[in-house]
Amino acid sequence: DADVTQTPRNRITKTGKRIMLECSQTKGHDRMYWYRQDPGLGLRLIYYSFDVKDINKGEISDGYSVSRQAQAKFSLSLESAIPNQTALYFCATSEPGTEDTDTQYFGPGTRLTVL
Amino acid sequence: AQKVTQAQTEISVVEKEDVTLDCVYETRDTTYYLFWYKQPPSGELVFLIRRNSFDEQNEISGRYSWNFQKSTSSFNFTITASQVVDSAVYFCALSGTFNGGKLIFGQGTELSVKP
């Protein structure tokens, strides 16, 4: 089984709808991240969480919110989806203070289309 | 400023050619990490390598090799005898204490290997 999973893998929704993307990990990592990827713009950080009680905005947090329900779960919500939020969304995890410090392991991605 | 530049947006080679993907970084940190990730057409992001700023030894893994040169702030990636399966977008990334362990990604280089 994959260490980092994302659900759903694909989603089509309409403008104004609230949508939640979920991420789960079995790696036991404390740190989790949400990114979006747009063609030509690379990966941009939306939110990140260094532990269950620590949540921080990334460079493009407007229009998004997150919830860290447990060490293993980190959800991203679009409160009122708009077409320019159409993108590929990735969840990632990492663990500090190890030989693997700062290495991020990514989920398979969620392709979101907002009509 | 902390920054990662992948100047090559797209590269096209014929199978069995060698190809080098360039990565130049900027950082004020003395301790930092450099990474390469692969994103094949299927979309997932695959971790390839992590390099500590104190370790300038080149690394080879099969057909892949990485050349880290602090003097030129570069961390280049070479694929020897390229294969069609190497076709992907490759991202270089940087982390350090300046950024609390978060990754800064380059814009990516799209490699196309033609048969």
Image (tube, coloured by chain):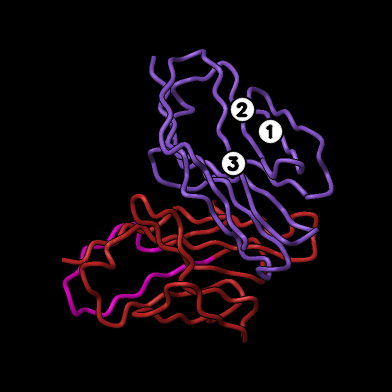
- Nearer-the-camera pick, A24 or B87: B87
Q: Which residues are magenta?
A: A7-24
Q: Amino acid at mark 3?
A: Cys
Q: Are marks 3 and 2 in contact (CB under 8 Å)?
A: no
Colour purple, chain: B
Tell me the residue at 56%/82% (across/down). Answer: A55
* Mark 1 vs mark 3, CA separation in Å: 10 Å
Chain assignment, label 2: B
Colour red, chain: A
B86 relative to B103, above or below: above
Q: Residue furthest right?
A: B54
Element carrying mark 2: strand
Residue A30 lies in quadrant: bottom right
Label drawn at residue B115: none
- Nearer-the-camera pick, A41 or A77: A41
- Residue A26 in percent (x, y) is at 61, 62
Is residue A97 rendered magenta in the image? Answer: no
Q: Residue furthest bottom?
A: A53
Label 3 crowding class (10 Å Cα cut-off): few <14, some 14-19, many 20+?
A: many
Q: Are marks 1 and 2 in contact (CB under 8 Å)?
A: yes
Label 2 crowding class (10 Å Cα cut-off): few <14, some 14-19, many 20+?
A: some
| Residue that mark 2 sits on | B78
* Mark 1 vs mark 2, CA separation in Å: 6 Å
Q: Are marks 1 and 2 on the same chain?
A: yes
| Residue that mark 3 sits on | B23
Label drawn at residue B66: 1
Q: Does label 3 or label 2 sit earlier along the sequence?
A: 3
Q: Amino acid at mark 1?
A: Trp
Q: Main secondary structure of the magenta part?
A: strand
